[in-house]
Image (cartoon, helix red, strand yellow):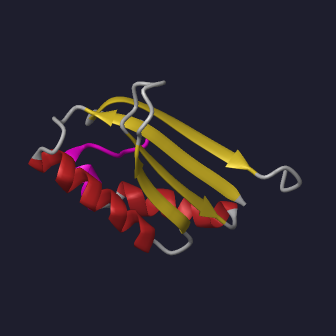
Amino acid sequence: MICHSVVFKLKYPKNSKEEVKFLNAAKDLSSIPGVNNFRCLRQISKKNNFDYGIFMEFDTQEDYERFRTAVNASVLLEHQTYKFGNTSGFFNSLNLHYTIPGDF
């Protein structure tokens, strides 16, 4: 299993139409085949500078690669906000990818 996490702070003002549009488009990622346990969450701690987190799991590397291909063709790229290697809509972001010990 692969766990994919992205924590981020958007350049858009809080509650702006751009922020809402981005978050609604991000929720559509859950409909991509192979995406499991999708969550889009708002940060409540003041211990870091991120505002949101998107978390999901994949059963196989193939499912993860299918997701990456689908994201590269998604509506999110229209706004240049969620593209691997190009995070121009983010003020700051951190991408993390994990596998469960024993799945190495």
Whether the magenta-drawn stretch holds residue 51 is answered as no
Q: Where is residue 68 drawn, in percent x and y?
A: 48, 56
Q: Is residue 52 above or below residue 31?
A: above
Q: Among all residues in the image, which is located at the extreme left?
A: 17
For the point 68% across and 56% down, the residue is 2
Residue 87 visible in the current orientation: no
For the point 16% across and 45% down, the residue is 15
Q: On the rendered structure, is 80 left or right of 13?
A: right
For the point 18% across and 55% down, the residue is 21
Q: Choose top left, top right, bottom left or bottom right for residue 73.
A: bottom left
Residue 7 visible in the current orientation: yes
Whether the magenta-drawn stretch holds residue 76 is answered as yes
Q: Choose top left, top right, bottom left or bottom right for residue 11.
A: top left
Q: On the rendered structure, is 5 left or right of 82?
A: right
Q: Among all residues in the image, which is located at the extreme front?
A: 45
Q: Where is residue 82 drawn, in percent x and y?
A: 34, 46
Q: Where is residue 6 drawn, in percent x and y?
A: 48, 43
| Image: magenta residue range | 75-84
Q: Is residue 99 above or below residue 70?
A: above
Q: Where is residue 102 drawn, in percent x and y?
A: 89, 54
Q: How many marks?
A: 0
**Where, quadrant-wise, is the N terminus in this rendering?**
bottom right
For the point 42% across and 26% down, the residue is 46
